[in-house]
């Protein structure tokens, strides 16, 4: 578990959560505001990234935000922004029509995720220029605002014939221990064991349990198999149905310096529930891995660090405005 160094909060009992004002997203052709209960049949939203393009989303269905599902899980009750924009995983719409809205949908990995039907982020530029990687879980490419540096040319999977995890780029990302990583003079080995404090502070809170900050995640959870969420295989984007297909869910090497591992008592990508027997008082130890601090709760530990609101399970309140539910813990939205 990554220690969240951003401001944390304690939600007081009975605190009323308020919806975002309607100036966060323009819905429909008349520019009217979106309510937390219903979306119109046509919405236009900025997709962010480096293109500034917009996306039209049709056939939007009414949502049930604020009302618990049959499982008792309460979906979010307000729009959630990513760096001032609203994407599919923050728009209060069940975009893939599976009955699960935004953070309640296990395919949503934060407010900067623009798909609800796969693990692929879907934001233009999110996977970065060929080979070069920065924080995967925000809405832009380039390490200027997050201090995270990596290259898939450092990944030993980038060898013929497949050149995973960027098979679409062929030999251009071929593995080399001496690869040049734009923006830094550090070697592959050095970046694997230490990322900057800026990377820790900015990208650490955005990184789901079970992933490194570059989108290399352990799927299935606790299975020892890591795949890159940005994989673009010929058969489509990585989802839960294709985890055993390396041509779609392409293997990757997790960067140890920013790996937010999946502890037994945490909710993780591909693991919607803590292990049996978890809960109650926290018994934790912390250790340093490069610039990232990790916390191991162990058996009987809590879902989140002390002082951080838990979310995503039956009976747990939605996160308040300016926070999102990131694998079971309320985390501040990226600015």
Image (cartoon, rainbow, N blue to C red):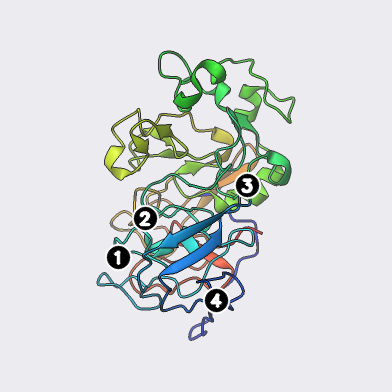
Give the CA distance from mark 3 to mark 4: 24 Å
Mark 1 vs mark 2: give the one in front. Answer: 1
Give the CA distance from mark 1 to mark 2: 12 Å
Mark 3 vs mark 4: give the one in front. Answer: 4
Residue 307 in sight in this render: no
Q: Is 142 located above or below residue 186 in the figure?
A: below
Q: Position of residue 252 (x, y in %)?
A: 45, 29
Q: Which circle marks residue 51 in the picture?
A: 3
Q: Which circle marks residue 99 in the picture?
A: 1
**Sequence order check: which comes first, mark 3 or mark 4?**
4
Residue found 34% across the figure and 56% down from its top: 274
**Sequence order check: which comes first, mark 3 or mark 1?**
3
Q: Which circle marks residue 30 in the picture?
A: 4
Q: Is 273 located above or below residue 318 in the figure?
A: above
User: In the structure shown, which secondary structural element does the residue marked by tag 2 occupy?
Assistant: loop
From the viewer's perspective, is 187 left or right of 311? right
Q: Is 123 located above or below residue 214 in the figure?
A: below
Dot 1 and dot 2 residues touching (CB under 8 Å): no
């Amino acid at each position: 578990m990554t220690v969240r160094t951003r401001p944390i909060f304690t939600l007081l009992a009975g605190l009323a959560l308020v919806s975002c004002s309607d100036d966060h997203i323009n819905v429909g052709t008349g520019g009217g505001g979106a309510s937390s209960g219903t979306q119109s049949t046509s919405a236009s939203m900025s997709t962010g990234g480096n293109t500034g393009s917009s996306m039209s989303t049709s056939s939007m269905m009414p949502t049930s935000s604020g009302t618990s599902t049959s499982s008792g899980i309460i979906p979010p009750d307000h729009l959630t922004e990513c760096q001032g924009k609203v994407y599919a995983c923050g728009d209060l719409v069940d975009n893939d029509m599976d009955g699960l809205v935004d953070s309640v949908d296990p395919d949503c990995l934060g407010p900067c995720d623009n798909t609800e039907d796969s693990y692929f982020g879907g934001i233009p530029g999110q996977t970065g220029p060929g080979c070069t990687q920065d924080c995967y879980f925000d809405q832009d490419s380039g390490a200027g605002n997050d201090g995270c540096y990596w290259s898939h040319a450092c990944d030993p999977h980038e060898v013929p014939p497949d050149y995973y995890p960027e098979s679409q780029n062929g030999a251009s990302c071929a593995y080399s221990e001496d690869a040049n990583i734009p923006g830094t003079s550090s070697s592959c080995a050095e970046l694997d064991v230490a990322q900057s404090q800026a990377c820790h502070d900015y990208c650490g809170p955005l990184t789901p349990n079970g992933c490194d900050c570059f989108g290399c995640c352990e799927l299935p959870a606790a299975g020892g198999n890591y795949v890159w969420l940005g994989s673009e295989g010929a058969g489509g984007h990585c989802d839960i149905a294709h985890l055993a297909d390396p041509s779609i869910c392409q293997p990757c090497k997790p960067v140890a310096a920013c790996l937010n591992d999946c502890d037994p008592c945490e909710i993780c990508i591909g693991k919607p529930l803590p292990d049996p027997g978890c809960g109650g008082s926290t018994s934790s130890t912390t250790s340093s891995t490069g610039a990232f601090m990790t916390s191991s709760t162990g058996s009987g530990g809590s879902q989140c660090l002390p002082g951080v609101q838990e979310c995503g399970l039956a009976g747990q309140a939605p996160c308040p405005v300016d926070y999102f539910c990131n694998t079971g813990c309320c985390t501040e939205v990226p600015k």
